[in-house]
Image (tube, helix red, strand yellow):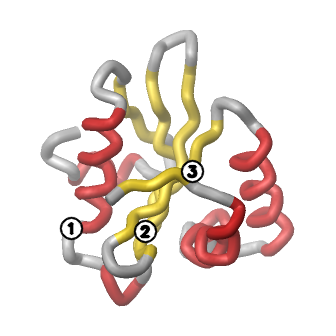
């Protein structure tokens, strides 16, 4: 289930976000978290099954009515089980009126999603 990020999930979210190649540096990671917490067009979602095992970060582009997937991360012990694809599918269902697009960091994964 895709849930919206809350400050109480900060440590879990930072841990998942740190798996993204460009978020390894602590200062960069903290800056990214601040942007998700303060910028109106940046939204962070967490994927919860029994525990929180995935993260999806999007940037809303008002001019094109699209959501750009900036970050997508799954706990390593839950990878290759379709969690990432389920997160993208849930996002598409939640925002059926918006186009879902990728950036250079997420394009490789999003292209593998047969429903994207």
Q: Residue at x 20, y 76 (%)?
A: 81
Q: How far apart are the alpha carbons under marks 2 and 1?
A: 11 Å
In the rendered image, which quarter is residue 109 located in? Answer: bottom left
x and y, in percent, of residue 22 in the image: 64, 63
Which residue is the extreme one toward the right? Answer: 27
Q: Residues within 10 Å of mark 2 (few under 14, many from 20)?
A: many
Instruction: Return the x and y of residue 116 as percentages of the image width and height.
Output: 23, 39
> In the rendered structure, which disc, 1 or 3, sits on the residue that comes first in sequence?
3
The CA span between labels 3 and 2 is: 11 Å
User: Pointer 1 and pointer 3: residues touching (CB < 8 Å)?
Assistant: no
Write down the residue under mark 3: 44
Confirm or deny contact between disc 3 and disc 2 (CB under 8 A).
no
Cα–Cα span, label 1 and label 3: 19 Å
Rendered position, 12 above or below 23: below
Q: Which residue is mark 1?
A: 82
Per the image, label 2 sits on a secondary structure element best described as: strand
Answer with left or right where residue 82 lies relative to residue 11: left
Q: Which residue is mark 2?
A: 54
Task: Measuring from the top left, give residue 75's x and y in whole percent.
Answer: 43, 80
Left or right: residue 64 versus residue 87 is right
Mark 1 crowdedness (10 Å alpha carbons): few <14, some 14-19, many ≥20: few
Give the mark count. 3
Q: Is residue 41 above or below residue 97?
A: below
Above or below: residue 25 compared with residue 111: below
Between 27 and 92, which is closer to the camera in this rendering? 92
Question: In the rendered image, which quarter is residue 50 located in?
Answer: bottom left
Kind of element beneath mark 3:
strand
Camera-nearest label, 1 or 3: 3
**Callout 1: helix, strand or loop?**
loop
């Amino acid at each position: 289930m895709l849930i919206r990020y809350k400050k109480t999930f900060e440590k879990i979210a930072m841990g998942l976000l740190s798996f993204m190649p460009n978020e390894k540096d602590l200062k960069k990671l903290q800056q990214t978290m601040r942007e998700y917490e303060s910028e109106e067009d940046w939204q962070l979602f967490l994927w919860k099954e029994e525990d929180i095992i995935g993260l999806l970060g999007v940037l809303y582009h008002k001019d094109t009515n699209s959501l750009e997937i900036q970050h997508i991360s799954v706990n390593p012990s839950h990878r290759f089980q379709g969690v990432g694809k389920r997160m993208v599918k849930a996002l598409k269902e939640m925002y059926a009126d918006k186009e879902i697009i990728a950036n250079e960091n997420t394009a490789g994964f999003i292209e593998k999603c047969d429903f994207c």
